């Protein structure tokens, strides 16, 4: 993945413009240089890579994969841009410090475990900052109320799980929780455990020494850090050959790409290949196993069923090698007895994009506002998604029309419908 960019690959682009029609950044800026076509054109004529302007243009991409999906020439534009970012001199990137601090934090479980405490401080700080403060935007993902609600709900789920601890069920699956479910929103992880118990899928093992999947590091062009994290996770899950379930769409996408990180290391490539083959995505996993929902559903969920649901497709599940679009919708339909509402223009990116949200909060907000306008035209009352980044974006977003939504991770939403395992 970190090989020098092949000039021939850049010349494969025929400038058809298909990428402009699907690019979320182009939709809100109208700037040709920010499309895949524009970036490829710049890359093919670059003279001085040590340029802050050039770095800024490359950073204004969500890596959502929409352009690669419609490219008539089959160019893997996401991979191309990651390679380009990895070759940039760090001093030319004006967002370097913000990206570095985020990547370092995600790579350190000790730092991440302190974020819940930091959220309380951040909450007090946020209330004192002006509404247009840049610091407010940076800290807003540490919403203390949401984190507190997650921990309270997590305790309730643990009580519901308690009777199952003495049951001698075999361990059938391993669980890659991801940073959000491990450190900030533990109720996501507990919901996954609860559903597995409720559906008699067997016990799940969650290795305590797993680390960040490495997506943020790779997206920022820090491939050495992405490889370090990948090796750590591969080793952590190497003590058995159980299937590995993950409840985060972004983590799923990254874990499946581990072999790409080791194209120059044959031994690790084979290990990564075996590891990624074991990875399963949450909605597909439970959709496959939930043959008869009626045996497990609570009888007093009428209020939940009445609320119209909009399922937000994570870009990492919409595009790429492993497209998962119908499974979560079918799963929700089985549970609520009605299909999720759809947007008139179809699924769209929310604009979070991990490091993109930190580097370009205004652009991220504009893209999200566009999506909010579309959702506001539906009957949706509840927003459900399975991507950590998308979940944070929706929870932070404030609709200008005054309409508010209940926002939940798919695992948390589903667990509200289920009885304890019997």
Image (spheres, rainbow, N blue to C red):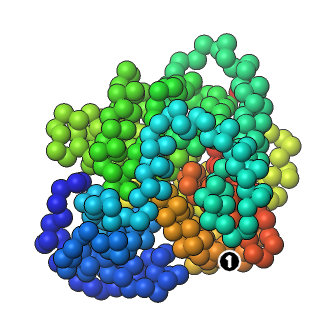
The residue nearer to you, when weighing 173 against 129, is 129
Q: Residue at x 34, y 45 (%)?
A: 226
The residue under the point 19% across, 80% down is: 45
Residue 286 seen in this snapshot: no
Q: Is residue 43 above or below residue 135?
A: below
Whole-percent x, y for residue 116 in the image: 66, 39
Between 198 and 76, which is closer to the camera in this rendering? 76
Image mark count: 1
Q: Residue 236: horizontal and vertical position, in percent? A: 40, 27
* Quadrant the C terminus occupies: top right
**SS assignment at label 1:** helix
Q: Position of residue 95 (x, y in %)?
A: 44, 62
- Pick whichever, 388 or 45, lies toward us: 45
Residue placed under numbered mark 1 in the picture? 373
Quarter of the image containing the N terminus? bottom left
Q: Is residue 35 left or right of residue 416?
A: left
Does residue 42 appear in the picture of this structure? yes
């Amino acid at each position: 993945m970190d090989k020098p960019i092949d000039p021939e690959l850049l010349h494969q682009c025929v400038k058809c413009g298909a990428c402009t029609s699907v690019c979320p950044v182009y939709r809100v800026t109208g700037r040709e240089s920010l499309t895949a076509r524009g970036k490829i054109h710049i890359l093919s004529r670059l003279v001085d890579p040590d340029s802050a302007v050039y770095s800024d243009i490359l950073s204004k991409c969500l890596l959502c994969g929409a352009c690669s999906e419609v490219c008539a020439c089959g160019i893997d534009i996401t991979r191309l841009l990651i390679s380009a970012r990895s070759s940039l001199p760090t001093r030319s990137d004006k967002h370097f410090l913000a990206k570095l601090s985020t990547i370092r934090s995600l790579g350190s479980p000790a730092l991440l475990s302190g974020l819940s405490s930091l959220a309380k401080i951040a909450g007090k700080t946020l209330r004192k900052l002006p509404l247009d403060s840049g610091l407010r935007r940076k800290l807003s993902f540490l919403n203390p109320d949401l984190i507190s609600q997650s921990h309270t709900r997590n305790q309730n789920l643990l009580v519901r799980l308690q009777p199952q601890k003495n049951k001698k069920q075999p361990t059938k699956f391993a669980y890659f929780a991801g940073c959000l479910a491990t450190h900030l929103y533990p109720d996501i992880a507990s919901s996954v455990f609860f559903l597995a118990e409720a559906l008699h899928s067997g016990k799940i093992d969650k290795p305590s020494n797993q680390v960040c999947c490495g997506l943020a590091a790779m997206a920022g062009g820090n491939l050495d850090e992405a490889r370090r994290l990948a090796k750590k996770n591969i080793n952590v899950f190497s003590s058995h050959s159980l299937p590995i379930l993950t409840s985060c769409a972004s983590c799923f996408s990254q874990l499946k790409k581990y072999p790409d990180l080791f194209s120059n290391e044959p031994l690790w490539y084979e290990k990564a290949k075996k590891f990624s083959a074991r990875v399963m995505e949450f909605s597909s996993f439970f959709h496959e196993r939930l043959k008869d929902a009626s045996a497990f559903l609570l009888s007093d969920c009428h209020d939940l069923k009445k609320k119209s649901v909009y399922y937000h497709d994570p870009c990492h599940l919409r595009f790429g090698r492993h497209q998962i679009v119908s499974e979560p919708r079918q799963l929700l339909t089985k549970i609520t007895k009605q299909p999720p509402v759809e947007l008139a223009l179809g699924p769209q990116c929310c604009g979070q994009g991990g490091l993109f949200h930190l580097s370009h909060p205004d652009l991220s907000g504009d893209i999200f506002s566009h999506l909010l306008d579309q959702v506001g035209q539906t009957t949706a009352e509840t927003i459900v998604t399975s991507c950590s980044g998308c979940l944070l974006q929706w929870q932070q977003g404030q609709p200008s029309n005054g309409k508010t939504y209940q926002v939940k991770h798919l695992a948390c939403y589903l667990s509200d419908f289920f009885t304890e395992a019997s």
